[in-house]
Image: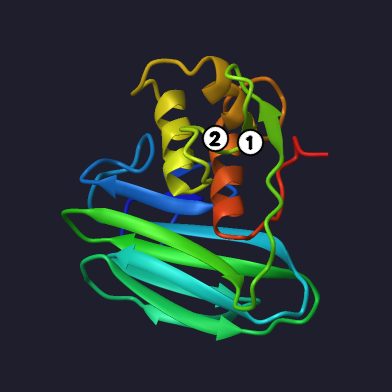
Amino acid sequence: MDYFNNQTLSGTPASSTNTTSINYNWGTGSPATGVSADHFSARYTGSFGFDGSTYKFNATSDDGVRVYFDGQLIIDAWKDQGPTTYSVSKTPTSGNHTVTVEYYENGYGATLSVNWAKTSPITNLPCTFTNSFGKAQKYGDVNNNNYVNAGDATLVRRNILGKDPAMTGDAKKAADVNGDGTLTTADSDLILQFYFKMITKFPVCP
């Protein structure tokens, strides 16, 4: 994600970060080091695989957002607004396609979330491990409530940022969905992708 200290995506980015998903609630804070809390803009571009099914694209933004698919503008809400969700359906050809998201923040709260999922049901395949109580617990189910959702991703991200005590035991094992033994934003991003059905299983699963 490239961030600019203006609302028009102009000039050289003030900061650039790597991300595999877009789900931000910056509130009234700065989105990245060196970027102002208000009057900034951002652009994200990534290549993703699609299988020829019909997908529903969703964008929630405060303030402006534009979403492009292979250069075609599919969501256009470039205006000052409170958190508002826009959706559009698209049936891409099978293969890799480029998704670009543009965003600007004028003032007060800042929110940006973009995701997509097949409109026909697909089956997620969570795998499990035996937790300290001798029960099967799903990878990604950090709070062990038998569901994998955005709340689990939030718990992982808060842990990484040091806002909560360090995860140990079953919670840490459930959160380590890429199986590398450490908790990083890659784990929280994968949990979100699983929840939004952008992937059907975690790397840690056989």
**Percent of width and height locating residue 116:** 56, 68
Q: Which residue is mark 1?
A: 139
Colour pattern: rainbow
**Percent of width and height locating residue 141:** 54, 37
**Mark 1 neighbour density, 10 Å: few (under 14) some (14–19) many (20 or more):** many
Q: Amino acid at mark 1?
A: Tyr
The residue at the point 83 percent across, 39 percent down is 206
- Left or right side of 158 for 122: right
The answer to whether 173 is drawn above or below residue 186 in the figure is above
Count of numbered circles on the image: 2
The residue at the point 52 percent across, 74 percent down is 57
**Percent of width and height locating residue 96:** 77, 68
How far, Cα to Cα, is label 1 from label 2?
Answer: 16 Å
Between label 1 and label 2, give the one nearer the viewer. 1
Q: Amino acid at mark 2?
A: Thr
Q: Which residue is mark 2?
A: 185
- Left or right side of 53 for 140: left
